[in-house]
Amino acid sequence: MLHRIKRIVITGIVIYLSVLGLLYVFHPRIVFQPDVLPPDHQFNFDHSFTELFLIHEESGERLNALHFAAEDTVKGLVLYFHGNADNLQRWGRYTADITRHGYEVLAIDYPGYGKSDGKATEEGLYRSAELALNWAQERFPADRIIIYGRSLGSGPASWLAARHPARQLILETPFSNMAQLFRKQASVALVPFQPHPKFPVDQYIQQVDYPISIFHGTNDGVIPYRVATQLKPLLKPDDQFITIKDGSHNDLRHFPEYQELLADLLK
């Protein structure tokens, strides 16, 4: 009887550890879902843009980017870091919400996304964010640069903001960190599992000494609202956590309050 119980316990432990191992291997594939584009792909948008490539000096890898022109007198530039899936052909259209307010936008595709070289990793996204900022700093002073992170993009955006001055940091549908997000989404308790990538947004925003604004919807099924609200007590007194009632993960731009508040931030 004791031998049977011991065998069951050992089997359970082996299965448990095997699941943890598989999660460790496959978690990056869940986080990063790139859609590769052919080199000759022609981007198509209703607002003016220029395609360019940023070069990593050390690796020589190319980072595909789109520079969208402002519709009116140029106030500055927004660095736009998109979500975890697809590529700039999808995400580029969202930049019209920004350019109509007089800001240029530089949007990048992460390594392995679209036409960008390399493979997506947490460190690779950070290096790419730094490269994009270097490009922006050659054209605008820090007080005319806004850092904007959407969903997964909250990771590199908050990392960048913690290290460099800018006008403000805007996060749309962010998470607190990958561990908290995973625990909320997992169907079983896997306490020892520490996901990689980590993207500790909650740590980074505490190092940002300029304004932060966060948008999140109450019906977000991808990054639950309760995960995002963990960021709220970490904000400075003058920062904003903006709740969009009934908003989900991909539709905040359709809510008047989002557009009104975004316009106010981009005055």
Image (cartoon, rainbow, N blue to C red):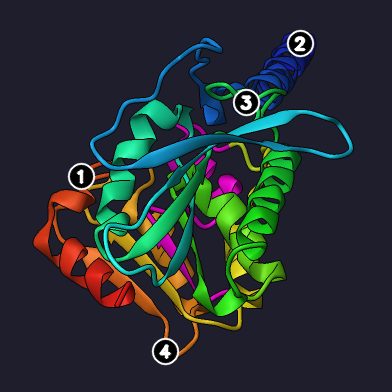
Q: Are marks 2 and 1 in contact (CB under 8 Å)?
A: no
| Quadrant, the N terminus | top right
On whether residue 171 falls in the magenta region, the answer is yes
Mark 3 surroundings: few (<14), some (14-19) or many (≥20) residues within 10 A: many
Callout 4 amino acid: Asp
Counting residues from the N terminus, which is met first, the one under dot 1 or under dot 3?
A: 3
Mark 3, residue position: 116
Q: Secondary structure at mark 1?
A: loop
Residue at (70, 26) in percent of width and height: 24
Q: Nearer the viewer, mark 2 or mark 1?
A: 1
Residue at (52, 57) in percent of width and height: 176
Q: Secondary structure at mark 3?
A: loop
Counting residues from the N terminus, which is met first, the one under dot 4 or under dot 2?
A: 2
Q: Are marks 4 and 3 in contact (CB under 8 Å)?
A: no
Mark 4 surroundings: few (<14), some (14-19) or many (≥20) residues within 10 A: few
Alpha carbon of mark 2 to alpha carbon of mark 3: how far? 50 Å
Does 100 appear above or below 73? Answer: above
Counting residues from the N terminus, which is met first, the one under dot 2 or under dot 1?
A: 2
Residue range corresponding to the magenta coloring: 166-189
22 or 198: which is nearer to us?
Answer: 198
Callout 3 amino acid: Ser
Which numbered circle lies on residue 55?
none
Residue 102 image position (x, y, % from top left)? 31, 65
Q: What is the residue that sits farthest to the right in this orientation?
A: 58
Q: What is the residue that sits farthest to the front in this orientation?
A: 73
Q: Are marks 2 and 3 in contact (CB under 8 Å)?
A: no
